[in-house]
Image (cartoon, rainbow, N blue to C red):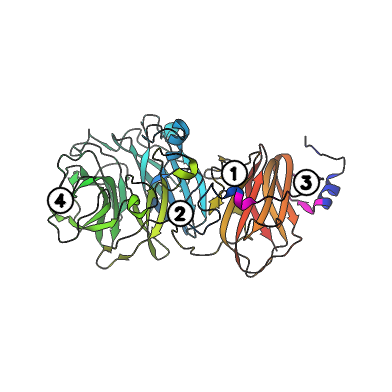
Amino acid sequence: MFRQKVLVSAMVAMSLLGCTKNTTAQVNADEPKEINEDLEAKFANVSPKLTSNNANPLLDFMFTADPTAIEHNGRIYVYATNDYQQYENVGKDGKNHYGFIRSLVMMSTDDMVNWTYHGIINTAKLSPWTLNSWAPSIASRLEADGKTHFYLYYSNSGVGTAMLTSTSPVGPWSDPLGKNLVDRSVPGVDCESPFDPGVVIDGQGTAWLAFGGGTPKTKYLPDNSRIVKLGTDMKSLASNVAKIPAPYFFEASDLNFIDGTWVYTYNTSWDPRTEWPYGVDKPTQCSMCYMTSKTPLDQNSWKYRDNYLKNPGDYNIGPYTNNHTHLFKFKGKYYIAYHAMYLQDYFGTKGGFRNVGIDEVQVDEKDVNIYMGKATFKGTSQLNPLNPFVLQQAETTAGTSGQVQFEAVGNPGNMVAKGKVDKQCLMVRGADFSQQIPAKFEARVKGKGRIDVYVNSLKGPALVSLICDGNEWATLSKKIERTIDKGVANIYFVFNGKDFLFDEWKFIY
């Protein structure tokens, strides 16, 4: 049963509000007057992204770390350690010792500034035999069944490397092994922590896995970095495990394949650089470095090249922390995904909780040179405008009012925003109104709540408002009485309501 505040028919109610009932829907007939509120001031100290042009961190409503990425159908999908799960367990006064993390985070974009949050991969449920899930690495390949298969490797705490598979970048995921792919029981592994995997598929379709970590036995050339060829099934080993002589190696192994060359990247230790027999500058402490090889199983073939990203603390975007990156190419540009403690002040914590950011980096593919990058709040530029006249997900954001909650509903990877009594905000950047002026706004919603839509600024009256009061999913639309200037704009969705859910939206011209 639906609730109405006055006894009028649904047709009269919709006429009063200018709403169209596209599915089963119900709206309040007595729309409350808009309260004059300084929304910019209200949200100013919650998120560093909402009212700025910053693109970092990628998600500003939760903590994420240790990124990896894969391209699929014109989108880049990023997977990360779920630091927010640790935060939820220990609270803002607790420490991030990573012990409560048993899930991974999924997100994607087609423009590098508006990110769609796809929820979590629940490794505790999928692989209950594992201890933790950190530092994923992913590869994909078109297989004989005509489907693209995704192979996701991750750290099972510090004891080994586990894996999951799917035929979609957002799942459902499955555990094909029920055990570690590599751990200390595998001959040749023989390193303290066979974790932090990095996977790559080379030009011949062969997959390779790097891993390793631990307390250095010797500061200059610690003996903990490994690489192995994977079997054609991506879940077995097809070679002996080889060592990589990585100077001051600590953790965070990753692999790329560029122009016939294997590129191994890793995080250096905090130890002083007392020995340095190379013709390039010493890397700073806990920075990211890279090596190259044409024959990766030959230990002597690996050549140290340089460092390419300093510690986030060196860039003044947060305190010093561990370091972990992934290098990838998307739409003709190279990027570094990494983590830094962007959000600690906004969440009121000093516990060591991290967030993924991305910045562009220059790569010379011919000589396989990675030039020094930089970690920033500004982040990446928008590659293409967002189309507001096609269906968009409420979980696609370039900024929020901070600590917005989302809930999984429907198909794997689909999330909906959850209302609260107090107002929250979602923002998308670079929406293209240059060719069309919107005449209506519609949204798929459920429960009792309100959405006020603003364009380019949170000041002044809302462009349009929707009010919902129904216990079933409904697509509501509202005629827009005001006009906006043609051009590219940011859109702000201010919403609230207990038990209110916001799934999708679009404008209609």
- Comparing labels 2 and 1, the label whose residue is closer to the camera: 2
Instruction: Give the spatial CA distance, label 2 vs label 1.
Output: 22 Å
For mark 2, what is the residue? 56
Instruction: Give the spatial CA distance, label 1 vs label 4.
Output: 49 Å
For mark 3, what is the residue? 32
Amino acid marked by disc 2: Asn
Are the residues at dot 2 and dot 1 in contact (C-beta closer than 8 Å)? no
Left or right position of 262 against 395: left
Q: Which of 148 and 100 is in front in this view?
A: 100
> Which disc number belongs to residue 306?
none
For mark 1, what is the residue? 416
Amino acid marked by disc 3: Pro
Q: Is mark 2 on a helix, strand or loop?
A: loop
Q: Where is residue 164 in the image (x, y as percent from the top left)?
A: 39, 40
Instruction: Give the spatial CA distance, label 2 vs label 4.
Output: 37 Å
Instruction: Give the spatial CA distance, label 2 vs label 3.
Output: 36 Å
Tell whether position 500 is magenta: no
Left or right position of 99 against 487: left
For mark 4, what is the residue? 299
- Comparing labels 1 and 4, the label whose residue is closer to the camera: 1
Q: Is mark 1 on a helix, strand or loop?
A: strand
Look at the image and tell me whether residue 230 can be seen: no
Does 222 appear above or below 97? Answer: below
Query: What segment is highlighted magenta in the picture?
Result: 17-41
Does 39 appear above or below 331? Answer: above
Residue sitting at x 39%, y 45%: 65
Q: Earlier in the sequence, mark 2 or mark 4?
A: 2
Q: Where is residue 148 in the image (x, y as percent from the top left)?
A: 42, 51
Amino acid marked by disc 4: Gln
Instruction: Give the spatial CA distance, label 3 vs label 1.
Output: 25 Å
